[in-house]
Image (tube, rainbow, N blue to C red):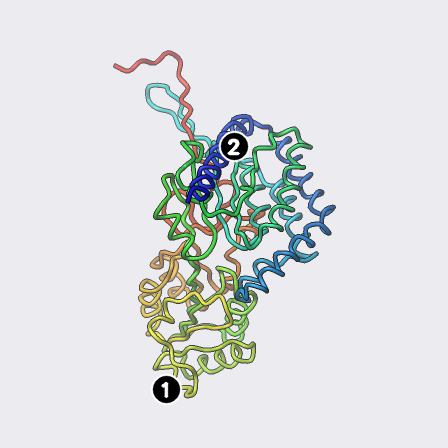
Amino acid sequence: MLDAVSNQNSVEGLMLDIGRRARAAARPLAIASTDAKNKALLAMAEALVAAEAEILAANALDLKNAAAANLAASFVDRLTLNSARVAAIAESMREIAELPDPVGSMITEWDRPNGLHIERVRTPLGVIGVIYESRPNVTADAGALCLKAGNAVILRGGSDSVHSSRAIHACLVQGLVTAGLPADAIQLVPTTDRAAVGALLSGLEGSIDVIVPRGGKSLVARVQQEARVPVFAHLEGLCHVYVDGSADLDMAKKIVVNAKMRRTGICGSAETLLVDSAAISTHLQPLIEVLTEAGCEIRASATVLRVIPGLKPATEEDWRTEYLDAIISVAVVDGIGGAIDHIARYSSNHTEAVIAEDPAVVERFFNEIDSAILLHNASTQFADGGEFGMGAEIGIATGKMHARGPVGVEQLTSFKYRVRGNGQVRP
C-alpha cells in the first residue's frame, strides 16, 4: 500500500512539473514568429524521415506486444506504421508548415459611433493536453498542429503505442531545438501509469487550458466525467450513409464500399447503410452484393430480410454500435424523412453522407441533420483534417462549443478583442 501511495505521489509530482514547464514554454511560443514555427516543422519532417528505421523498430515492439495481447485487428491497423505511413506523417508536417499562421489573424473588425475601432483576432489557447490511444501518428499530428497554433502541448499516448510515440516525439523535440524554440513546448508523458491521465484531467494546478481526448468510448467518457478543464469532445464515429431513390446506382455502389471498407478501423468508417424504400427494387440488392463481395458482413433490418432472406438479422444494439470492423447494419427507410429520423435517433453526430441527385433531398439532409460533418455524393472516409486541407487533425470534435469537426490549427486558437481609441471615455 505504501508503495502504491509513493508511486501515486511520484506520478503527481512528475505531472505537475511537466505542467509547469509547459506553461513556461507557452509564453514564448505564443509570440514565436511564423518563420520559427515553420522552420521547426520542416526540421521535424526531416528528422522523421531520417529516423524511419528507428521509428519502425520501435513500432515493431508495439506490434509484438499487441499480438501477444490479442488486440483487435482494427486496433492493430491504427497502431501499425510502415515506410509509407512514416512518409505521410512527415508530409503532413510540411503541409502544416504551408498553412497560414492563425495567430494574430483578424477574424473581423468594426467601428463604433463613438470612434472606437474594435478588432477580433486569433490567439493561442495556451497549454493543451492530448490523451490518445494506439495511434502513434497522433503524437506527430497533435504536436505539429499545437505548435503552428502557438500552443504548448502535453501528449499522453496509450501504453500500446509507447515505443512508437517516444521515437516520433524525439524527432519533434529535435525540430524545436533546431528552430530555437523551447524543447518543453511538446512534451510526451514518460510514464504509462494511468494516474498520469487523472493528473492531466485535474488541470495540473491551472497549467492545462484544454483537454483533447482521442480514443475509444470508455476513454472519452472518462475524460468528460473527470476533466476539470474544457474538453473538445470526440465521441465514437457512428456514421451513416443514406442512399436516396434518386441516387446514381454505380456511384452509390462505389461510395458505399469505400465508406465502409477502405479502412474499417477509423472513426469515419460507415457503420449503417440506409436505403430509400423507393429504391428497394433497384438499389438494395446491388448494394448488398457489392458489400458482401468486398468481404463485409451484413446486419439486416426486418424489411431488408424480407427482400433478401438469409442475412444476419440486426438487433436494436446494432444501430448503436461502432463496429470498427467489416460489418455494417442495413435498413430501409421511408425517404429522406425516414433517414433523418433514424440518424437523429442513433447518430453520434460525427459524419453522415447522402447519395442523391435530387437537390431537394440534399438540402433537407444538410439543413436538418446536426452532425459535425455532412457529405453529398462522397465517402464518409473524407472525415479527416488532412482531406479538408488542414494538414492534419487532432481529432473530430462532435460537441457544439468552439471547435467542431476536424480540429486543426484554427480550432486550436481562441480570440481576443483589441479596441483602439483616441481619448474616448464612457459617459
Mark 1 crowdedness (10 Å alpha carbons): few <14, some 14-19, many ≥20: few
Residue indicated by mark 1? 306
Q: Looking at the rendering, in which quadrant would you find the N terminus? A: top left
Residue indicated by mark 2? 22
Q: Position of residue 40 (x, y in %)?
A: 65, 35
Q: Label 1 sits on what residue type?
A: Arg
> Eyeballing the image, is 321 above or below 416?
below
* Mark sitting earlier along the chain (1/2): 2
Q: Label 2 sits on what residue type?
A: Ala
Q: Looking at the rendering, in which quadrant would you find the C terminus? A: top left
Residue 406 got which mark?
none
Mark 2 crowdedness (10 Å alpha carbons): few <14, some 14-19, many ≥20: many
> Eyeballing the image, is 68 above or below 187?
below
The residue lying toward the viewer, choosing from 236 and 351, is 236
Q: Residue shown at 34%/14% (left/top)?
A: 424
Q: Position of residue 175 (x, y in %)?
A: 66, 37
- Asked which quadrant contains residue 421, the reply is top left
Q: Residue shown at 41%/64% (left/top)?
A: 359
Query: For this view, does 278 lie left or right of residue 176?
Result: left
Q: Residue shown at 31%/13% (left/top)?
A: 425
The residue lying toward the viewer, choosing from 111 and 197, is 197
Determine whether the residue tagged by mark 2 lies in a helix, strand or loop: helix
Q: Position of residue 67 (x, y in %)?
A: 59, 64
